[in-house]
Each structure stands twice: as C-alpha cells, then as structure tokens.
Image: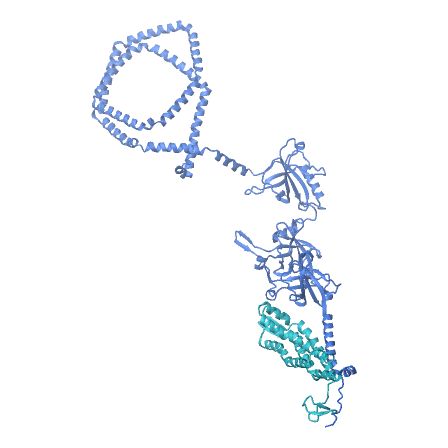
Amino acid sequence: MGIVACQRCTKAAPLGTRTCDRCGHKLQSRDPMSLQRVWAYWFVGLLCYIPANVYPMLKTQTLFSTDESTIIGGAVELAHHGAFGIAAIILIASVVIPLAKFWAVAYLAVSVTQPTRVSNQRRQFIYEIVEYIGRWSMIDIFVVAILSALVQLKTLASINPGPASIFFALSVIFTMLSAQAFDSRMIWDVQTKRDSAT
Amino acid sequence: MTQELPEVSVSPTRKVFLSGASVVWIIPLLALVAALFVAWQSFNARGPLIVIEFENGSGIKASETELRYRDVTVGVVEKVGFSEGLERVTASVRLDKEVAPFVDAGAVFWVVEPEVTAQGITGLSTVLSGVYIEASWDDFPGPAANRFQGASEAPLIRPGQSGLEIAFRTAANGELTDNAPILFKGIEVGRVGRARIAPRGNFAIVEALIYDEHRHLINGSTRFWDTSGFSVNIGPAGAEIDFSSIATLVGGGITFDTFVSGGGVVQDGTVFDVFPDKESARNSLFNASAVDPLQISVIFDDNISGLAVGAPVELSGLKIGEVESISGLVNVDQFGDSRVRLNANLSIQPARLGLPGDVSAENALTFLESRVVAGLRAGLASASLLTGGLKVELVMVEDAPTARLRDDGTNLPVMPTTKNETSDAAATVEGVFTRINNLPIEELLNSAITFLDSAEYLISNEDLLNTPADVRGLLGELQGLVSSTDVQNIPVSLNATLVRVETLVAQLEQERVAAKLSAALDGAASAAGAIETSVEGVPALIAQIEAVAAKAETLAVDELITELTALTQSVDRVVGTDDAVALPGSLKRALDEVNYTLQELREGGAIENVNQTLASARNAADSIAVSAQDLPQIVDRLTQLFAQASRTIQGYDKGDQLSRSVQDALRDIQKAADALGSLARTIERNPNSLLLGR
C-alpha cells in the first residue's frame, strides 16, 4: 500500500516521506524503539513500586502518637477494624490494578515478539483497558494529597504524605509512559507476518 | 488497475532491537543507580545494633522508643524481645553511626519514666510521649560492645561527670535517704545515690557525689549529719520546732560542716559516717580517738538492775568511757559459790584520761593499775534518780583492802570493786511504801466502820437523846431540895447535935473517962508487960509472917492476869452487847430512882431521920467510948495487917510478869490509840473512805 499515517495528525503520506507535510511530525511506519521504551519505562515503574509499598504512605500525627502506615499495612488495619469495603477498594486500586498493569504491559510487549494463542483483538482490548485505566491509578495520590491538605491541625493532629506516595506516583507515571510507548500496531504486525508466512 | 503497489518494507522490530539500545534506557539505569545509591547510603549510615537487657519492658516499644544521649535522639529500638529463658527483656537498639564509637563497655543505659518522689517529679515529658532510654557514656571512643545491662535507675555519677565520689555510712541511730541532696549552707553541693544495706546488716551505705566545684569543702575532718525531719524542744524559752527546710523535711537531706581545721585531702572512695544530728556529729569529732579503747572487765557481787549497755563510766565525774556489754557470771572455782555475778565490760577511751605522752590502751592500763594499787575501785552509782539508771564510777576508796588489776593476758583485765553507792532514797521510799502496803488498813477501817455504826446507833438512841433533859430535871430537883427550908435547917440541927455531943463528952470527961483512962493505962502497962513476956514468941511470929509473905509471893499472879484479861474481854463483850446499848435507858431509870429517892427524902421526913441518925451517932459515940478499951488490940491487928499488906505489895512488885503484862496492856492501848490516830488521819485525808467502806 505504501502509505504511512502520521501518528500525531493521522494524515496519510506515501511511504518514504520523512516528515508529515501537515504537522511536521516525524513519519514512521513502525517505531523501532517502541519496545525498548516500553521495557525501560516498565522497569522504572516496577522499581518505584517496591519502595512505594515498603515505605509508609501516610504519616498520621495525633497528640499522643505518630502513626505511619504502608499501603498494605493500612488496608490490613482497616480490615481489622471491620472496614472490609474500604480495605478492598484500597487493595484493588493500589495493589491489584498496578500489578495487573505491569502484567498486561509486559504480556503485550512479549506477545508481539513471541507467538501467542490470544487473539489480536483481545490483546488490542487489553491495551485499550490499560491505556484507559492508567490515569485512575493516581487516585491514591489524590486521596493522600487531599488528606494532607485538610488535616493540618498543628500539634493536635496532622497528616503528611509519606515517602511511599512519591514512589507510588512515579510508579504510576512510568507505567503510563510504558503503556503509551507501546505501539499497538505491532499487535497486528504479527498477524501480517503470520499471514505472509502462510 | 494494474498499478502495483510499492512493496512496503516492514522493518522487523527484532532487527532494530538488536541494532542498538535506545537512549531511553538511560532512565531506568539512572533510577537503578539512584536506588542503589540510596540503598548503599542508608545502609552505610546505619549504625550498629546493640542489645540492652532490662529487668522489665517498662513501656519500651519497638520502632518507637528512642535512645537519647543528653536528650538528643541517637537511636531507636528496633525489637523488643526476651533473653534466653525469658529472664530479662532485651531491647535491640539501632544506634546512630556517629555515636557508635563512643558506645563502649562503660556505657550506661536506663529507662526514663515519669517518677514522683519526695525530691520532685521527673520524666514528666514521658507521660505523653512514652518512655525513652537514656544513655550515658564518656567522651572517648572505646572498643565496640553490643550487649549491655540496663540499669534500673539513673546512675548517680554519669560517665564523664566529674566530682568527688565518696560514700556515707550510717553511724548509730543514723538514717539515710535515697537520692537526697547534700546541702551546704542551703546550697546543693552534691547528691546521694540509692542507699543499700551493708552485707552484715549493721549499717546502711550509700554513695554520694560532691560536685566538682564544691569538692574543696570536704576534708578529712568534715562531719556529715542528717537534716531530714524536725526536732521539737520544749525549754524555758518555750516550745521550739526546728527543721532545715520543707524540702529536707519531706525528702531528707544531708549537710556537713568542718568543725576543726587540719583535715587531710579526701580521695575518691572515702567513707564518711552520717550522724543523726549536728550535736552528735560535732561530738564525734572530739570523741573520736585514733587509738583503740581500753577494754577492762568489772565483776560486781550484787546484781543490781539498772546498769545498761552504753552507761557512762566516770572517773572523778568525768566520762572516760562506757559500758560495752553486760553479762551474768557464775564461777564456782573463782568465787567459791554459784551465785550469779554481774560482769560488765567497760570500754575506756585512753584519750579521755589525759595521760602525758603516748596515748595508748597500754598506757591507760598501766595508769589504771597504779591507781588501783592506790585504792581506785569500781562501783555502781545512780546515774539518775528518776530513771533508776546506773553508771560505773571509778572512785578512790580510803583504806581499801589490797587489790590489783588482774590481767592474766588472755581474759580482759578485771578491776576490783567497792561497795555500790546506789542512792538510798529509792530504797527508803520503797520501804515506806512496803510498810504502808502491809498496814491492815482494811481491817482497821472495817472495825472503825462497825464502831462508828454502833456509835451512831448509840447516839441516835432516843433514850440517850433524852438524858440531858432528865439530868437537867434532876439538877433542878436537887436545887429545890437544897433550897428547901428543911435542908437549910440542917446546920441548926447539926449545931444543936454538936452542942449535945459536947455536953455528952463533957459528961463523959467528968464522970468516967479519967478513971477509965487510968485503968486503960494500967491495962496498957500490964499489956506492955504481957508484951515483954511474950517477946519470946516474936521470932515465931516473924517466921509466920515471912511464910505468909512467901505464900503471897507464890500467888498465882499469872492466873490473876489471865482472869483479868478474861474479865476485860468479858467487859468488851458486855460493852458490845445489847444490854450495854440499853445502858442509857438503865442510866435514866437509875437517875429517875435517885430522883425519886430524893423526892422521898424531901417528902418523907428526912430531917427527922437525920436527927435520929445523929441520935444514933451519939449512941455510937457512946459505944466508941465503950470500945476504946479495945483500941490497943485493934492497933496491933492493924499493924500486922499493914505489914502483911506491905509484904504482899512487895511480892507484887516482884511480879515481873505482871508488870510485863501491864506494859503489854499499855502497849496495846497505845497501839489502839495509834491505830485510831492513823484512822483519823486516813479519814481526814480521804473522807470518801467512810462512805465507800474502804
């Protein structure tokens, strides 16, 4: 077909054109560095995710005591107090979804180079979910930020973000970058290759 | 359309992947480097883990309790656990790296808790924040150690703190208070630690720190005393309550003074005695003798109560020592009997004797030996009249039997004794009280009460009450009688009678008396002659008289006395009988009878009777005249009777028993009088006894 679409303004141009004549974006049929970026960001995201779970997320200071709780520790504590619903939400939003994203991105990145039994449509669907859900992962940071802003009663009681919140935010950011770096067209390249092979 | 689409070269990703790394890999690499750097840095900054063992957890919490040095956090407890066998609590503390080199074997750790004591409130901040572990170590790095024993309380002297470290020991009756301040003129110059009992239990000991800037105040002759509590003195100036300050009143305190100069420099570790008060502290300075006291023993023959351990030993009124111990002593071989003797061991301060030259126990003993040869003896004397306490007095005895201070080298030298000079006052008073106790006061009072009852009954008898009136009536009648004309006429009648008697006598004279007298004289003469002739019979008569006298001598005077006594008793009984009580009535009746008789006299021609009587008298006179002839015989009989009576009376005089009985009787009477006297005094002192019957 010999046509390449601009990734920014989607204007099609004949193959071999270097830059988009409408928006000036570099035209490329496939991003050769896509997978490398995916893996690089994925790796940083995972690296940040470890301290995000080890260090305390919230520092709660009351008159008599200072309480520091990690994400999982806080959820467990809530569960101990009977708030299973909230504990479940925290666990899902802060643990299950990030881990699922790591898994999904890694799976997609692997699946474009290795033969897979999962259909291309399903993998495209996974990619879209990851893309969509990524921004909501920041909800934890949002809650921490709001609490820290609201509860500042000097010595009586105060809530401050712990070091984990920074790492968690970084982890989310890098996961999103990783997902964005993935060129979803590669999903279909495998199909093309398989078709041409047969 | 046969237009061929140009072949699109789809460059495979693999090729690109293999062709070279993307620039984006720098980001994870940087992240990794950063993470590794942070990890390495935090690991590098981590200090060593030390383990401190405590008696109990006392609020230590993992990852919360801090370790502080000079109130700066230098570590955090990471783990709280138990030592093997759950004997102690172990706290694992992560130290900060910069202090780690200083935490050597000399470091001290203790838990700071809120504490309320008499000295004040400490650790108040830990009420809210929770306890923390306070640490203390010196300023020099030492070989690392990682296992420590936590102290149960803050150490008195923290490493690195300088000062004079001394120890206090309680003197007799002294007390020590934990953590008390050491005050000098009201300023705290040191502090006392936690007191403990010496191993043998005979005193308490406590270490103390005099702060460095005040250490020059202490020298060898400094004396410490306890200022806790208060003293109350009641004297001529009124009551006086004395205490140092409220703080020491509550929490105790120790103060000191250097009464004399010349004390040596005090080294760390010197032990000072703490005296109960300033007076004893001052005294101790002068009492203290560098030499050992001289021990001698005294054996007193009498076991007198009142001598106690600590009683003074005095020589010429000067206290030279005290009684150290008292015991009983039985030594048949030495004393020859098995009586218990009082053995007192005396402790004599040689310095008190004021001996010239070297002051030593040997010198003192030599001195005492020479004095004993001169007559020095030990004796017990009253120390106090009130308490009856005794003291040992060494006194010079004039003409004392020879004695020496026995010193056989093995036992204590034994001092000879003299008569004890215990005060007689106590004994006398005691004797008086014993006598009073023995008085039959109960019986006496009982008799007195019955006697008084009887007397009361007698006095309250109506008959007796009427007696005075009767007597008055009687007197009135007597007056009436005397003032009656008949009685007044008696002298006239008497006069007439006498005139008649005179005439009668004149008649007698005229008629017969002269003749009869001459005849009587003749008779007398012949009687004299008869006497002369009968002189031969006189010796026999005298012998007879003597026999009579002897009989009189052997008269059973004893029985007489017995009978007299019995009679007296009978009289006693009679007096006690109802008849005696009824006596007033009889008396009244007798008086009535007298009265009646007098009335009869007055009414029944008494004058005539008198006249008749006088006539009889005249007849009697006549009879006298007649019987005058018999006069010489009567005179003889009277003479004999008088002689006999005289002898009898002599015999009575010789009756010692009688006189003794009389004396006894007199004594009894006197006793009775005394008893009555004491009864009267008793009643006077205590009138209630009459009512109460005792």
Question: Is residue A15 at least partly visible in the picture?
Answer: yes
Q: Which residue reaches farthest right?
A: B19
Question: Is residue B150 at least partly visible in the picture?
Answer: no
Decide which of B344, B465 is in the foreground and name it: B344
Question: Where residue A47 appears, x then y in whole percent?
Answer: 70, 75
Question: Where residue B496 appears, x then y in whole percent?
Answer: 22, 19
Q: Which quarter of the figure is the N terminus of chain B placed in? A: bottom right
Residue at left 70%, top 60%? B148
- Per the rendering, the colour in which chain A appears is cyan
- Judged left or right of residue B688, residue A143 is right
User: Compared to B272, does A113 lie above or below?
Assistant: below
User: Compared to B127, does B424 lie above or below?
Assistant: above
- Judged left or right of residue B101, residue B627 is left
* Quarter of the view holding residue B457: top left
Decide which of A131, B152 is in the foreground and name it: A131
Q: How many labels does the image show?
A: 0
* Quarter of the view holding residue B402: top right
Residue at left 36%, top 27%? B575
- Per the rendering, the colour in which chain B appears is blue
Decide which of B44, B626 is in the foreground and name it: B44
Question: Where residue A130 appears, x then y in whole percent?
Answer: 66, 80
Question: How are the colours assigned in the image?
Answer: by chain
User: Compared to B622, does B220 lie above or below?
Assistant: below
Q: Which quarter of the figure is the C terminus of chain B placed in? A: top left
User: Compared to A175, does B552 lie above or below?
Assistant: above
Question: Where residue A5 appears, x then y in whole percent?
Answer: 70, 90
